[in-house]
Image (cartoon, rainbow, N blue to C red):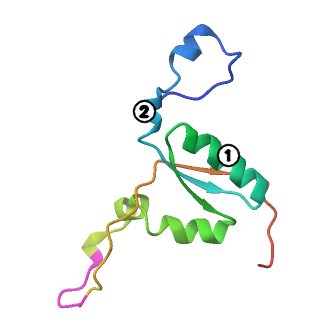
């Protein structure tokens, strides 16, 4: 998929912008502690057809990731023990991209 650029980018860069139909296939996780930023970004992405989930911190992001296709792809299924009763699992949630603020402060909550 193409990299998103600013509207001031070159004509060649604008040609690589994803179409709306490509964006409707994106499942986005927003990791953001500021409620205003959460709402603004989620609104913009949903207007473009993305499916958006929001969490407010890194721990919640890790918990969410454990339920996604990312975790399903990266788990080692060869470690399951014979005869072990496994809990029925839900189908993993689709995930295309994670958007987060690298300067998010750590908090005690």
Left or right relative to 96: residue 34: right
Picture coordinates of residue 50, whole percent (x, y)? 50, 44
Between 30 and 85, the residue placed more toward the observer is: 30
Q: Which residue is mark 2?
A: 22
Left or right relative to 106: residue 25: left
Q: Determine whether the residue tagged by mark 1 lies in a helix, strand or loop.
A: helix
Picture coordinates of residue 19, whole percent (x, y)? 46, 26
Report whether residue 96 is seen: yes
Q: Earlier in the sequence, mark 1 or mark 2?
A: 2
Specify the label residue 23 is tagged with.
none
Report whether residue 101 is seen: no
- Residue 55 covered by magenta stretch: no
Question: What is the spatial separation of the Cα atoms under label 1 and label 2, in whole angstroms?
Answer: 18 Å
Left or right relative to 101: residue 43: left
Disc 2 residue crowd, few under 14, some 14–19, many 20+, Cα 10 Å: some
- Farthest residue, direction top: 11
Residue at image coords 25%, 72%: 78
The quadrant in which residue 103 appears is bottom right
Residue at image coords 33%, 73%: 90
Residue at image coords 70%, 54%: 38
Q: Which residue is mark 1?
A: 41
Left or right relative to 37: residue 75: left
Picture coordinates of residue 56, whole percent (x, y)? 69, 65
Location of the N terminus (image quadrant):
top left
Magenta residues (range): 79-85
Location of the C terminus (image quadrant):
bottom right
Dominant secondary structure of the residues highlighted in magenta in the image: loop
Q: Determine whether the residue tagged by mark 2 lies in a helix, strand or loop.
A: helix
Looking at the image, is 71 positioned above or below residue 23?
Answer: below
Q: Are marks 1 and 2 in contact (CB under 8 Å)?
A: no
Between 103 and 109, the residue placed more toward the observer is: 109
């Amino acid at each position: 998929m193409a990299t998103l650029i600013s509207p001031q980018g070159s004509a060649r860069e604008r040609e690589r912008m994803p179409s709306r139909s490509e964006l409707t296939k994106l499942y986005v996780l927003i990791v953001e502690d500021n409620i205003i930023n959460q709402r603004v970004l989620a609104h913009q992405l949903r207007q473009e057809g993305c499916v958006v989930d929001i969490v407010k911190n890194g721990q919640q992001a890790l918990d969410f990731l454990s339920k996604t296709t990312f975790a399903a792809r990266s788990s080692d299924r060869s470690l399951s023990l014979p005869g072990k009763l496994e809990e029925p699992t839900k189908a993993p949630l689709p995930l295309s991209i994670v958007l987060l603020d690298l300067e998010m402060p750590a908090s005690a909550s």
